[in-house]
Image: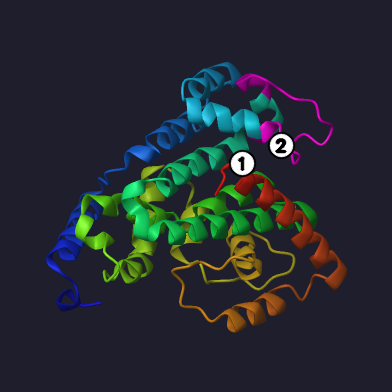
Amino acid sequence: MSDKALNLGEQAFLHTITQELERGELRFPTSMEVTLRVLEALDHPDTDLTRMSSMVSAEPLLAARTVALANSAWYNPGGRLVADVPKALVRIGFGKLRALAMAVAAEQLIHRDVLGPYQPLIRKLWAHSVDVAATASVLARRCTSLDRDAAFFAGIVHDIGQFFLLARVWEYPEMLQDDSPLSDLVRVWHPPIGRAVLAAMNMPRELVDVVDNPEIYGGDWPPTNITDLVFIGHLLAETPNPFSEEDEGFRHGLARAATLGLDEERLKAVLEESAAEKQAMISLFQV
C-alpha cells in the first residue's frame, strides 16, 4: 500500500504508529490499561489469590465478568453459584483470567460509539478470536499434553495487532469514514503491531510466534506446540477473520489436511465442545 493511496489522516496515523514502534514505546488505549495491570501482576512470582482478588475486585467490569464466567454452565455444570471474586478465581484459575482480561478490553472496544461504521467488523473479529481460542483449548485438552489455558489465551491474542489498531484509530476520525481503506491498513500492519504489543506485555516467545507466523504449521499430529494449535483453530473456526482475504474453500481444505490424524467422530466431538465454550464467552460479553 503506497502513501499515494492514503489521505493525510491515514498517513498521520501510520506515522504515529511507526514512530512508536521504532521507539519501542507503544501507547496503549485506555481500554487495555486494566488488562496490562492484570497481566503484569500475573507474571509476578509473589502474586497470590488474595492480591489478585483485590486487584480484580477494584475493576467493576472485570470483577463482574469473572464471577459471571465462574457461574456459567461451562464452569459450573453443578449449578453451585459463587458470589465473590476469590471463589470465582479459584474456579476459573489464573490461566483463564489472562484471557478474560483481554476479553474485557475487547468488549470496551466493541461498544465504542465512535467506531460505529466498524463495529460489525470488530464483533466478527472478536467472535473469530474466541472461536480460535476455544478450538485450540479443546484440542489441547483432548489431543495433546499442552496447557489448555495457554492455548486459549494464545487464540484470544493471535490477532491482537488488529484490535490494537482499531482501538487507536478513533484518534483520526477521518479514517472512520466508509470510504477509508482502514481494512487494508489493519490487514497489512497487524503482524508488526501484534509482535510489539505482546513484547510490551512481556509475553513468552511462543506467543509472539503465534502472531509473527500465523500461517506456519509444523504438520505434526498431534500438535506439539501452541502455534500449531492456534493455526488449526484458525482453520476450523466457524467464524472467519473479517479482515482476511483468504478463500474460505481453501481454508476448509487446509483444515481437512491439518486434522487427518483426527478421526471424524473425535473431530465432531472437538467441534461440539469448542462451540459450547465459544458460546459461553460470546453470551457472557453479549457480543
The residue shown at (82%, 36%) is 77
- Would you call the spot at circle 2 few (<14 residues within 10 Å), some (14-19), or many (20 or more)? some
Q: Main secondary structure of the magenta part?
A: loop
The answer to whether the residues at label 1 and label 2 have Cβ atoms under 8 Å apart is: yes
Q: CA distance from mark 1 to mark 2?
A: 8 Å
Residue found at x 54% / y 23%:
52
Query: Is residue 71 toward the left or the right of residue 247 in the image?
Result: right
For image coordinates 63% across by 65% down, the residue present is 237
Q: Would residue 70 be counted in the magenta stretch?
A: yes
Residue 243 in picture, x, y percent from top left: 44, 69
Residue shown at 76% from the left, 76% from the top: 260
Q: Secondary structure at mark 2?
A: loop
Observer-nearest of 231 and 267: 267
Q: Amino acid at mark 1?
A: Leu
Q: Amino acid at mark 2?
A: Ser
Examine the rendering and report whether any part of residue 147 can be seen.
no
Magenta span: 69-87
The relative height of residue 76 versus residue 174 in the rendered view (above or below) is above
Give the labeled residue for mark 2: 72
In the image, 58 versus 192, the foreground residue is 58
The one of 145 and 175 positioned closer to us in this rendering = 175
Of all residues, the one furthest to the right in this rendering is 265
Q: Quadrant of residue 189?
A: bottom left
- Quadrant of the rendering where the N terminus is positioned: bottom left
Q: Which residue is mark 1?
A: 284
- Residue 59, percent from left and from top: 46, 25
